[in-house]
Amino acid sequence: MSKILSGELIGKKESVTEQLLLLNPHSTPFLSMVGFSTPVTQIEHQWFEDEMIAYETVVTEAVVDGAATAVKVADTEPFRVDHVVKAGDEMMKVTAVDVVGKKLTVSRGYAGTSADAIAAETKIEVLFVEGQESRDAREGRYKPRKRFSNITQIFDETVEISGTTAAVNQYGIDDIYEYEKQKKQLELALQLEKAAVNGIKYDNGNVRQMAGARSFINSNVIDLGGKDLTLPTIGDALQKIYEKGGFKTGGSYEIIAGAKQKRVISAFDQNVIRINQGEEKRGTVVNYLTTDFGEFPVSINNNLRADEVLIVDKNRIRLSALQGREFSHEYLGKKGDYLQGMIVGEYTLEFVQEAAHARIKGAK
């Protein structure tokens, strides 16, 4: 008699986490790309991120001539008294900072540079602090770490075989049950994949849904508004990441596209594309796109929207189970005229430093 029919497996949990990654990397490329990380211990998983004090912003109102000393800016965070700043070719010294009014008072034409009108939207950046001999220590500045979080989401499916199926296939019931279990594992893997990419954070006290990669990316978003995706557009997205400091710690970047945009990328000039047919890590064909910011793998993921491309740093993404809630299967035994089991897991996504990632949307 089979172990299922004899009841030997009832109530015993069996981990199926590793099997999920082996099922079909074409269907779950995001899961295959990032894998599973160390389990988390709370249903609201929190992490803290350090952020450098900003060093530039833009002028919000035009400065009409070289004699004006008031400069309105979008953000006063970068500036303090005695900073030497630059707008266009002119250097200026900050003599006062009005945080409430978002205004700087400056000494124009610093170090003999020419003072002239400054157009609105001109970048104004901090160069350095004017250093002087034998002066006291300056007032320190501190930017507290920011707290971010995501919540865990439960994924479950039921494996069920009818009494008729059990009777017809009496001598092969173990194999049939395993076959049904494998199908349910694939369904759960697809659900987790879609949540990790498309999820929107939601918690009503009973149902929890985690935020996915798309909803985390807010700083570096390019909307093409129905225009074609081009290599310069991808370059623009990479430049945004570069300017935010995303590449300074190296990173492990990958460009992800759905089938439609993947074909567009593959049609770029062939001298910027290298193809590896045997990319075993993801079980799919991977292109390598050469840009001004380096060479990056390009993979296909049909769980993305047809009009979008994501550029992500895999080192800053972690997919984790709630401790003790990794995907597992438990056989529940005979329930009336059928046999039943359950697969359940609870997972969340940690998406660190969203400004180190980018999204292109609205592509034709």
Image (tube, rainbow, N blue to C red):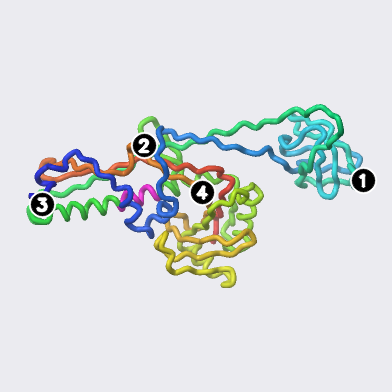
Q: Is residue 307 left or right of residue 109?
A: left
Q: Secondary structure at mark 4?
A: helix
Looking at the image, tell me whether mark 3 or mark 4 is earlier in sequence order: 3
The residues tagged by marks 3 and 1 sit, at their Cα atoms, a distance apart of: 91 Å
Q: Please provide percent x and percent y for residue 54.
A: 69, 39
Q: Is residue 180 left or right of residue 170?
A: right
Q: Which residue is mark 3?
A: 166
Q: Residues within 10 Å of mark 2 (few under 14, many from 20)?
A: some
The residues tagged by marks 3 and 4 sit, at their Cα atoms, a distance apart of: 47 Å
**Residue stretch in magenta:** 186-193
Q: Please provide percent x and percent y for residue 215.
A: 50, 44
Establish if 332 lies above or below 42.
below
Tell which tag, 3 or 1, sits nearer the viewer. Answer: 1
Q: Amino acid at mark 1?
A: Gly
Q: Which mark is residue 323?
A: 2
Residue at 59 percent across and 57 percent down: it is 224
Looking at the image, tell me whether mark 3 or mark 1 is earlier in sequence order: 1
The residues tagged by marks 1 and 4 sit, at their Cα atoms, a distance apart of: 46 Å
Q: Nearer the viewer, residue 3 or 345?
A: 3
Looking at the image, tell me whether mark 2 or mark 3 is earlier in sequence order: 3
Q: Which residue is mark 1?
A: 112
Q: Amino acid at mark 3?
A: Ala
Q: Which residue is mark 4?
A: 315
The residues tagged by marks 1 and 2 sit, at their Cα atoms, a distance apart of: 63 Å
Tell which tag, 1 or 2, sits nearer the viewer. Answer: 2
Tell which tag, 3 or 4, sits nearer the viewer. Answer: 4
Q: Main secondary structure of the magenta part?
A: helix
